[in-house]
Every structure is written in structure tokens, then in C-alpha cells.
Image: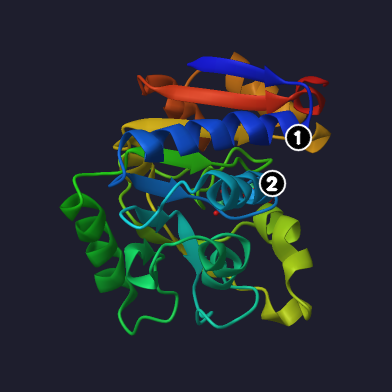
Amino acid sequence: MEIIRARDYDELCEHAATMIIAQVQQNRHSVLGLATGATPTGIYQKMIADHRKHGTSYAGVRTFNLDEYVGLAPEHPSSFAYYMRKHLFAHLDISPEQTHIPSGVATNLQVECQQYEDAIASTGGIDLQILGIGINGHIGFNEPGTSFQSATHVVTLTESTKEANRRYFTKEEEMPTHAITMGLATIMQSKKIILLVSGKHKAPVLHRLLNEPMSEDLPASILKQHSHVTIIADEEAWNL
Ligand code: F6R
């Protein structure tokens, strides 16, 4: 694992955006794996700024997001589909058909999961996957205890994850209880992975990740087995 120690959040975003832009410039048909949440927003802003200033084109790029809440339609302001349009897709030259997010309102969620796996496989796989990390070590919505062999599946969100995400919902009762997520095996099939760790609330989990052995109790620890992972962590995330 390569580890980049960024001075602050802005530098973390600069490093990550530079890597993503380089990927897209090297291969205009790149397949990107994308994440939502607080951490990637600054990266997306830098990608948009670069697209406007230098014209990096996403016309041939395909994207697959990690996850979506069950029960939220893409128009719901707290859905990850809405987040992606707002923070990235609406500002790039990428057509909606090239952007993929699991449907949280599919009539058959098991079929949706399988189709999502098939759609990723049909592209030849994800070239570069962006990941955040939960304070409990989750990646995507793969909560502690998730099998390292897991493919895209439906999960029950833990209390810790619901707590961390409640701020994105106007009413507490709107907080979904389930989500669809790429599995840990799905994530591991990506050719390159960038794991982002920002903020002092992430310091304990970064410390665990770097010091504990691989275990399903710490889902992100599976990344130790991947040959091409870059962890970018800002200074606050190093300060236990
Ligand atoms: C988001 C996702 C999650 C987040 C993680 C960190 O699509 O899959 O694993 O990356 O919960 O979230 P933030 O960045 O809000 O701390």
C-alpha cells in the first residue's frame, strides 16, 4: 500500500483529483468507481474546475458508484444518485447512461445486485476506484462482519452508520435501514484503488487499519491484499 500524507483536506483532494484526471487523460474510456459522502466533494470540485479550465473530457468515461439507499428514488435529495448529479455529473460532459448507481427502488433487489455486477464486468472492470472509510472501518456499505467474498448485495445499516448519515435527512424517520452496496470482492476486482481518510474522527480507524491484521471485523483491512492501493490521509487523520 502506498501512503500519501497530505497536509490538509485541500491537499488530499489535490492528490486524489490529480490521480483521477491522469487516469482519464491516459484512457478516455476509463471506468471509474465513485463514492459519495463528505470526503470526496472537494475532489469532485477539483475535477470540475479542471474540466472547465483544461477541457479534460469524460465523454467516453463510464462510472459505477459504490452504493445507494434502499427505498430512495434517484430524485430524492438524500439519494446518492442525487448527490452525484449535484456534486459531479451535472458539471461534466458525461451522459447519464454512462453513469451507474444501484437502484434502491428496483422491484427485485437481488436481481438488481446481480445486474450491477454484470454491468461492471461487461466493461472489463473498474480501472480506478475511489473509497472513503467509515469510523467502523466500512468501505462502501460493507459493515464489520461482511464476508471478504461478498459481491454486490443488500445490507442492513448499522447504528453507527445511520448515526453518521442522519444529518443528510431532514426527518429522522426518513433514514433508510438498508442499502445496496458493491461487495468487498467487487471492490477488490478494481485495478487501482484510492482510499481517502480525512479528519480527526477518522484517526482511530486509520490507526486500526495500519496496525491490525486483516480481519472481517475491519472491512477496509481487505485492501492490504490488493496490489495497487493508495491511501491518502490528511494530517488530522494521523493525529490520534
Ligand atoms: C459512500 C460510501 C461510504 C463512505 C464512508 C465515509 O458512497 O460508500 O463508505 O465513503 O461512510 O463517509 P464520509 O466521507 O462522509 O466520512
Q: Is residue 84 above or below residue 124?
A: below
**Is 229 situated left or right of 46 in this image?**
left
Q: Residues within 10 Å of mark 2 (few under 14, many from 20)?
A: some
Element type at mark 1: helix
Q: Which residue is mark 1?
A: 9
* Amino acid of disc 2: Gly
Q: How is the image coloured?
A: rainbow
Quadrant housing residue 112: bottom left
* Amino acid of disc 1: Tyr
Q: Position of residue 203 (x, y in %)?
A: 76, 28
Q: Which residue is mark 2?
A: 42
Q: Position of residue 225 (x, y in %)?
A: 37, 21
Element type at mark 2: helix
Q: Residue at x 28, y 62 (%)?
A: 116
- Quarter of the picture holding the C terminus: top right
Q: Is residue 203 visible?
A: yes
